[in-house]
Amino acid sequence: MPKNRAWGRFPSREFSINQTWLALTMIAADLVAWLKMLALDGDLAKAEPKALRHRLLHVPARLVHGARRRLLRLPKTWPWVEHLVAAFARIAAIPPPH
């Protein structure tokens, strides 16, 4: 089991809360695995969730509305901006299911 996971302790003494929490953490782990497999390459594809969180999810971006669409403004000085843009492009290139 990878390190830095929250599976060591359950958040409650109530079984149904713990059951839901465990299901959600498993879904989150699956989403991270799919992200690494489909959208990331190089070191990021092998990175632990903590590193992914630091490099990709804590981006100081702005969501801008205009011309009937939403844009995500990423800072050009962010060290992993190219990786994040490439990941978005790979995800957008996935064809829809039939």
Image: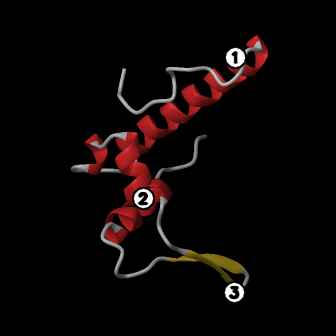
Mark pair 1, 3: CA separation: 42 Å
Is there CB contact under 8 Å for labels 1 and 2? no
In this view of the protein, which residue sits in the foreground, 2 or 85? 2
Residue drawn at x 64%, y 29% is 24
Colour scheme of the picture: secondary structure
Q: Position of residue 94 (x, y in %)?
A: 47, 51
Q: Position of residue 48 (x, y in %)?
A: 33, 40
In this view of the protein, which residue sits in the foreground, 11 or 60? 11
In this view of the protein, which residue sits in the foreground, 92 or 27? 27
Q: Is 89 drawn above or below residue 3 in the view shown?
A: below
Q: Judge depth for marks 1 and 3 and give the one in front.
A: 1
Q: Which residue is mark 1?
A: 19
Q: Is 73 drawn above or below residue 88 in the view shown?
A: below
Is there CB contact under 8 Å for labels 1 and 3? no
Does residue 60 appear anywhere in the picture? yes
Number of callouts in the render? 3
* Left or right placement of residue 5 versus residue 72 in this view: left
Mark pair 3, 2: CA separation: 24 Å
**Farthest-out residue, left:** 42
The quadrant holding residue 85 is bottom left
Q: Which residue is mark 2?
A: 56
Tell me the amino acid under the disc marked 3: Gly
Tell me the amino acid under the disc marked 2: Leu
Mark 1: secondary structure: helix
Q: Position of residue 78 (x, y in %)?
A: 36, 74
If you read the primary sequence from the N terminus, does the residue marked by circle 1 or circle 2 appear first? 1
If you read the primary sequence from the N terminus, does the residue marked by circle 3 or circle 2 appear first? 2
- Identify the image quadrant of the C terminus: top right
Q: Which residue is mark 3?
A: 66
In this view of the protein, which residue sits in the foreground, 51 or 31? 51
* Left or right placement of residue 5 versus residue 47 in this view: right
